[in-house]
Structure formats: structure tokens, C-alpha cells
Image (cartoon, helix red, strand yellow):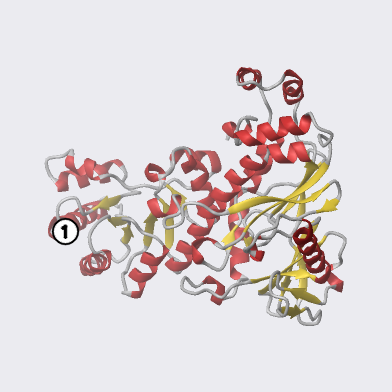
Amino acid sequence: MEHYYSGLYTDFYELTMAQAFFFSPKKDTSAIFDLYFRSNPFRGGYAVLAGIEDAVNGILQFYFDANDLDYLTSIGFRKEFLDYLATFRFSGNIHGFREGDIVFANDPLLRVESTILEAQLIESMLLNIVNYQTLIATKAMRAVYAAKGRDVVDFGLRRAQSMGAIAGARSAYIGGATGTSNTFAAKRYGIPAVGTHAHSWIQSFDTELEAFRKYAEMYPDHTTLLVDTYSTLKSGIPHAIQVAREMAEKGHHLEAIRLDSGDLAYFSKKARKLLDNAQLESVKIVASNQLDERLIASLLEQGAPIDIFGVGTRLVTGGEQSALDGIYKMSSIGGTPTIKLSENEEKINFPGKKKVVRYTNGDGYFAIDGVMLEDESEDRIRILRHPSTEFKKTRILQEVLSAEPVFFPLVEEGNLCATFPSLDEIRQFAKMRFALLSDGHKRFVNPHLYRVGLSNRLYELRRNLIEKGHRHG
């Protein structure tokens, strides 16, 4: 989206630091930053990576126009620095996971290599895009998993955080949603547009039956009727059945009814029975109303015969978790590995220039992710170590586990070097990768935590830097 590309799409302190770097000897010092998150969203066992294409495009088109520079002049930035910004273009390298891949806490998702000044300027935009889209793609995948093959559609536009609804619809589609009510996003990304009608349509007519008939006349091949405006069982469903019969006489059929209030398990069972008794077995039941993955799972456990779930507020806002805690930490400065110390060792980042390798077992399922230094060969790794617990180690038996590179070049010297797949291809890739995750990692309650380990060299480098930092801190 266009507003990503303004150089002002950043936190103010990125600009103040950039100006300070510009007037210091460190202006052209090389640096490496890693983007990652420390804990899986929704207390779950995984995340679905999204926003990579938008983030990379945003970086490559990140610039300062005349209005931006006038504004920065007005708030005291110096002319020499603004002259530099006038021709600013990112000139570094970016490596990372493919969009749609399944990722885990402490996986470096993106590695940015550039000058310290450039790498700092793009931090806020990167985090803004990847954090939100990954959160929503993950939420969608959880809802789709709970639905057990039934359709999940994005109904979140009116409850989203303003224009974030557009990226939210894209992310939900990556996570497995089959359509969106957001017409702008549907057009922009080629997502199927879906929708029924509002209660106000019913209220606009003298009777519910008249409203149903008029809607069916307008859309004879794509009619879904909202049946809970007045009384779901006494009028809504009986009137829908009457209109369905009238449609059949004209060679058309009612696609679905929609329930948007009340006890969805109870009403869906009653609705299914009434429809089946009227020989309308093909008519589907759509349910909406503050749904999320846990409610969907509960409804199906109760035997609710719902065919399509419309998920809105709790999808596009993240529901119980409104943000992913993605962070962007320096791991090398001037070619020297570095860390940020913390009293909590789990919060100390991984130093140096790294890559990620995924090890799969004999059945093809994900077993463990290995974070290692760039110059290490994954075929020679024999042990992966827990980042913070010395005695926890995983032996990598090459005859049992297969190494799969998952870190790829995206940008080289400021130029795009990757070909981005279509949104449908990203969606299919996410589905395929999710199928390679064992069920224990997918469950909603106390999921089995996926292992992300360090190579011996990286583990020892980190330990040495921690000890050095404590001595000199």
C-alpha cells in the first residue's frame, strides 16, 4: 500500500538516531539486524509468517519526497542530513523465510544487512507490517484448523483497526480463509468476495417474507438469507423455506441461511432439521457472531451442523492478542558479533550472521529448527543446543533427520532478487507446510512446544559474549 513507502513511516527516534549516525564516524558502518519473536502468538505452538512481500516492497520503495523533507526541516533536522535523505534508497541485503511458512519463537525470520543508518531507518516499518500480518494469518489458520474442513470467511472489515483491514484480509486468506467481505481487499488481491445482507434489508420492507423474496429475485443464483431479524424459528427459517420452494419452481435454489445471534449450536441444529424436513438438504448454514477458533471448536464438539463460519472481530483484531511481540535486534556491528544483554537470559538475542535450517523426520514432519552461523554446513551439524539450558541438547542423526534450508535471499545490494509467488500460491504453501506440523503443536490447550536450537559454534559465541558483557558491564 502506498503509505508504507514514505520515509516518515517510521518511529521518530529512528530519524534522530539516523541523523546522529550521519554526523558520526559510524555513518557507513555495516550492521546486521534480525527480526524475530520470542513467544508464539495466542499461547500456541506456531505462527504463520505473512507480510514478507509487502515488507520487502516497502523497503525497496522507502523514500523521502519534498513534503517529507520540508516537514523534517520544520522540526529542526539539519540540511546535510536532509540532502542525504533526498536520495535515500535501501542498498543492503535481506534474507528470510518464504511467506506462508510455519515459523516458531526465536526463529530469525528476516536478516537485514546494510549500513547501521539504513538498517535503523527501516526497522519500524518492517515490524509494523510483519507483526500484524503474521498475527492475523496465524489467527486465521487456527480458525481454519478448528473448522475441520468447513469454510472460514473474513467478516472483519467494520471491526478492524482502520485501513489495517486490507492487510488483515490478505493475511486471513494466507491463513486459509476462503473469502472476505472486504471488497477493496478482494479486488486488490484477487480474494473471493463474499457477503449476505444486513438486518436493515429486512427492516426496510413491510414483512420479512417480502424482503426475502426481493433479495432472491435480485440474486437468484447466489442467495443467502439472514433469518434472525425477528424470530429465527417462528418466522426466519419458515420464510426462508417458503422462498426456497418458490425459487425451486423457477429453476433456482437457495444457497444458505445465516445465523448471527443467539445460541448458535441450538439454532443450527433446529435449522438443519427444519431444512432437511423440507427436502432442502443442500441449503447450507452460515454462522457468525463473535466467533474465534475456540468457539468454532466448541460448536462442532456440540454437533452444530454449521457449514460456513463468518469470523470478524476476533480474526482481524487478533482477538485475545492484539499484537505479535516481534522485535528487531542488532546481531553484528562492523563485522563483529554483538548481543543485547538482559537479566533474563531467554531475552538475550543470538549474535552474528546466521541462517536457519529445518530438520524433518523420516515421515517428512518438522522435527527441529537449527539456527547456525552463515558459514556452517547443515550437513555437518551433529548437535543442536537449547539457547538457555546447557544440558538440553538434540542429536542430529543424518540418517534420521533431513536438513531443509528455509532461509533465502530476498534483496541483494538494494535490488529484489526473489520472485514472489501469487497470493493463492502463498496460501497453498502455508496449507502444505501446516500439514507437516504434528498435531501436538496445533492443539489450542498446552501445545507441544517446537524446538529451536543453536549450533555448538553459535551457542559458544553467545555464551562468550554474555560472559564478556557481564565482566565489562
- Residue shown at 39%/49% (left/top)? 155
Amino acid type, callout 1: Pro
Q: Which residue is mark 1?
A: 238
- Residue shown at 37%/42% (left/top)? 158
Left or right position of 229 against 365: left
Q: Position of residue 309 (x, y in %)?
A: 38, 59
Left or right position of 178 against 51: left
Q: Quadrant of the C terminus?
A: bottom right
| Viewer-side residue, 172 vs 113 | 113
Left or right position of 415 against 47: right
Determine whether 68 is above or below 237 in the image. above
Q: Position of residue 346 (x, y in %)?
A: 65, 65
| Viewer-side residue, 133 vs 122 | 122
Q: Secondary structure at mark 1?
A: helix
- The answer to which quarter of the image holds residue 389 is bottom right
- The answer to which quarter of the image holds residue 56 is top right
- Residue shown at 53%/60% (left/top)? 41
Q: Quadrant of the N terminus?
A: top right
Q: Position of residue 426 (x, y in %)?
A: 62, 54
Determine whether 351 is above or below 214 in the image. below
Determine whether 243 is above or below 393 in the image. above
Q: Is residue 191 among the parts visible in the rendering?
A: no
Determine whether 169 is above or below 371 in the image. above
Left or right position of 189 against 277: right
